[in-house]
Amino acid sequence: MDGDGRRLAEVVKGTHRRLRKRCRQGEDEAEVWKDHIQHEDVLRTYASAMHSLATNHWESTQQINTSRVTWVNDAIIQYYQKGEMTRVTQKELRKLTHLGLETECDASDGCLQKEHGKLQLLDVGSCYNPFSVYEHYEVTAIDLYPAQPSVKQCDFLGVELTEEATPLKNEGKNYNENGERKSSLEAPETASESPKSDVDKARSSPEKEQKSTPNSKSDKKIDTDLQTSENVTSNSKSESDVKEKECEEMNKKSESNESNRIRYLRRGFFDVVVFCLLLEYIPSPKQRFHCCEKAYNLLKPNGLLCIITPDSKHQNANVHLYKLWKITLGFLGFSRVKYEKLTHFHGMVFRKGLCKRAWELDADRELSNIKNTNVKSRFETISYDKIKHEMYIPQDFQELSDSDEELPEKCLKLS
């Protein structure tokens, strides 16, 4: 990694570090995030750094068999097109029969099989929409500060979920089923005409003016005054035209920004949700959990949550945390169907089960067992009572003065 790459990496790591530090020092996590997303200059710098790293540094050094995008795509294909979904579904149905539980969806809803067609994929924190190259996806790519027009602006932590294709009765006609605002086809209403000025009134009522000026000398004076007034009016109109044009340009820009913004996402609409290097950006354990909870609500039954988290250390260095992820997501109703530690990242695929209660029971049992496991000293501060609602990353256990490792030099070889 050259000097420019290291500089860009520090922009990314520094942003993550500052957000986590504020939360760990006692600031309200919601206010920290709210403050962060209001600083457009910070978002722009971060997005530019990530885009440059991904397109100019990672792709130039990556190996195709360790590409994060390739890994996620292969896992999705294996699941949906090569029989993995059928296998795990049948296994879960046997499990439910044994436990005396029932599915929370009906086969007629299509949750037990995937019809042929494109998969609805939500790429959160997408930056430059890398999954758009695959024809078998209908991609909804979102980011706080999109680097490309195909990526929609959206704060995933704050986005509202809607049950229907249209979010609000009054605004539904302006949004499509994914919550994207449709482009307006009608011109905005024009403002009513301004009241006529005194000069305009005088010009529109010459006879009345003549009656009020009985001699020719006065007539000449009025003509001179009118001519002067016409010049003033002409200048005023010119300035007014300039201001009107500026307003029109601002309105067009505002409309363009609004059309590229997603305010609502539809529950149970997506086949796949992707978190690629996302959870490291989210500053607190509770907010990471909320992201995963939101992903669960957005997925169809049998849908996949694919998580890529960077880690260039050996496989067992942080394995305890990722076991806890499996437990935490189990309480949400996810089961893990794939896990792999590659050289520079952990790849995980979680499936939204057909009966949440079944996976809650598994998670509760696994949590009881893991409490008695010997762990590294730096993980001893974990409060297992909070595991149901919090997700930890290795950086949570570093000293505030430590250098973060969410994007170490070796990891920068990822795409």
Image: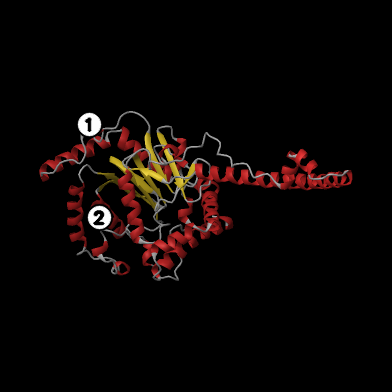
The tag earlier along the polypeptide, 1 or 2, is: 1
Number of marks drawn: 2
Q: Residue at x 62, y 44 (%)?
A: 249
* Camera-side residue of 217 and 8: 217
Does 121 appear above or below 45?
above
Where residue 162 appears, x then y in whole percent?
Answer: 34, 44
Does 377 appear above or below 210?
below
Tell me the quarter of the picture where residue 200 sits: top right
Q: Amino acid at mark 2?
A: Ile
* Camera-side residue of 354 and 403: 354
Identify the element where label 1 is drawn: helix
Does 384 appear above or below 208?
below
**Figure quadrant of the N terminus:** bottom right
Q: Which residue is mark 1?
A: 108
Report the residue that reaches farthest toward the top: 116
Where residue 305 appears, x then y in whole percent?
Answer: 33, 45
Q: Residues within 10 Å of mark 1 (few under 14, many from 20)?
A: few
Q: In the rendered image, is residue 75 in sight?
A: no
Q: In the rendered image, is residue 121 in sight?
A: yes
Q: Amino acid at mark 1?
A: Ser
Where residue 311 appears, x then y in whole percent?
Answer: 40, 56
Tell me the number on the disc at residue 327: 2
